[in-house]
């Protein structure tokens, strides 16, 4: 799972999330609300948390099994924490390789004939950094 900071950067860069069962997310709420809620990681599941789409927008509905009282949150208040396989899939045809180095992982992508390399000790973060570059270039 990628870090919260990288997830926020991806969201700000324009990464679009279509919630599906198994997706993980954290909340990014206004400062006046309790910050410890933001540290919790939630998983979308038909049994506990489901994405409900309305003409006015999407909400993430909590179906009464969480330990604190929360009925739903606006989709805009959620920060998606994509898994390694989701990150790799989002890189699509730009992905070239993943290499294990001595103390880190290196992800290589190719964009417009240019090969780019992203290195990080955590493989998901390396994929996330590559995706951040790709999303940033697509804007």
Image (spheres, rainbow, N blue to C red):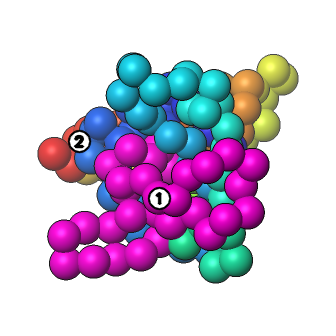
> Number of marks in the image?
2
Per the image, the residue denoted by label 2 is: 137
Residue drawn where x is 44% and y is 47% of the image: 78
- The image shows residue 53, relative to residue 13, as above or below, that is below
What x and y, as percent, mark residue 136?
26, 39
Please say whether residue 99 is one of the residues in the magenta stretch: no
What x and y, as percent, mark residue 62?
58, 63
Please say whether residue 76 is one of the residues in the magenta stretch: yes
- The image shows residue 133, relative to residue 24, as above or below, that is above
The image's mark for residue 72 is 1
Quarter of the figure that contains the C terminus: top left
Crowd band around label 1 with a 10 angstrom C-alpha radius: few (<14), some (14–19), many (20+): some
CA gap, disc 2 to disc 1? 34 Å
Q: Which residue occupies the foreground of this view, 63 or 45?
A: 63
Q: Which residue occupies the foreground of this view, 18 or 130?
A: 18
Q: Which residue occupies the foreground of this view, 93 or 34?
A: 34
């Amino acid at each position: 799972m990628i870090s919260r900071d990288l997830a926020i950067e991806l969201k700000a860069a324009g990464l679009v999330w279509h919630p599906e069962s198994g997706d993980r997310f954290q909340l990014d709420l206004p400062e006046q609300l309790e910050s410890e809620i933001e540290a919790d990681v939630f998983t979308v599941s038909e049994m506990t948390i489901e994405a409900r789409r309305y003409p006015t927008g999407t909400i993430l509905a909590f179906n009464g099994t969480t330990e604190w009282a929360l009925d739903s949150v606006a989709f805009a208040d959620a920060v998606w924490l994509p898994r390694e396989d989701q990150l790799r899939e989002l890189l699509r045809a730009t992905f070239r390789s993943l290499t294990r180095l001595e103390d880190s992982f290196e992800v290589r992508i190719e964009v417009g004939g240019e090969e780019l390399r992203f290195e990080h000790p955590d493989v998901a973060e390396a994929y996330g950094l590559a995706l951040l570059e790709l999303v940033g270039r697509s804007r």
